[in-house]
Image (cartoon, helix red, strand yellow):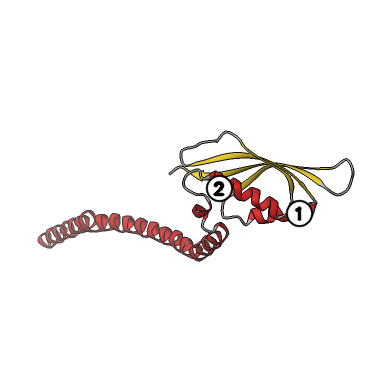
Amino acid sequence: MQVIKNKQFVMSIAVIMLAVAFVFFQYMPLNKKARTLNAANAQLIADNTTVNARVEVLPMLYQQNEEMKKQVGNFDAKIPLGRSHGTFLQKLADLMQQHGLTGLAIQPENEIETAKLSGIPVNIRCSGRLAQIFSFFKTLESCERVVRIEELSLTNSDKLEGVLTMNAKVEIFYRTQ
């Protein structure tokens, strides 16, 4: 019986050692790898959710981009390369005369230069009725060159006959590159 107990004891030790070996050499490394893979999977799911959210926004961004392109038009074409302001100032005077404005005075000032975009401030003075001045500005707005109105003042004549004197400071732009 002693032999059987010794065999049982040896078998029990062998089983325990196999169990310990299994835990240390199989279960623990695989468990660690499973935790690492689960963490990586969770990160991939989070990244996938972020990408899906961005993909859903893409059509809206595309639509906004198209609308902005329509609003801006061909902006570079409206800002010529080089000054060429003499011909534009002559065209400005012609527009004013076409709208029946009188007492024309157009005086350019010193340029404001930057690396890529420069501007020339221009003082404009003329007289006419409000409808004439308004139609001049509507025509100026649709002009092929970008013009920004910095200041505008309208003064009624002393005779109160409906003739206004307009003083405006506008800026015309050009590209240097």
Residue wearing tag 1:
132
Residue wearing tag 2:
87
In this rendering, would 170 be left or right of 33? right
User: Which residue is at the far top?
Assistant: 110
Q: Is residue 169 above or below residue 17?
A: above
In this rendering, would 114 be left or right of 108? left
Q: Residues within 10 Å of mark 2 (few under 14, many from 20)?
A: few
Which of the 4 image quadrants contains residue 177?
top left
Q: Amino acid at mark 1?
A: Gln
Q: Is residue 148 above or below residue 58?
A: above
In this rendering, would 43 be left or right of 80? left
Q: Whole-percent x and y of residue 13? A: 17, 56
User: Which residue is at the far left?
Assistant: 3
Q: Amino acid at mark 2?
A: Thr
Residue at mark 2 to residue at mark 1: CA–CA distance: 23 Å
Image quadrant for the N terminus?
A: bottom left
Q: Nearer the viewer, residue 112 or 82?
A: 82
Q: What residue is rendered at 58% in x and 50% in y?
A: 146
Q: Nearer the viewer, residue 117 or 158?
A: 158
- Per the rendering, the mark at residue 173 is none
Q: Whole-percent x and y of residue 34? A: 31, 59
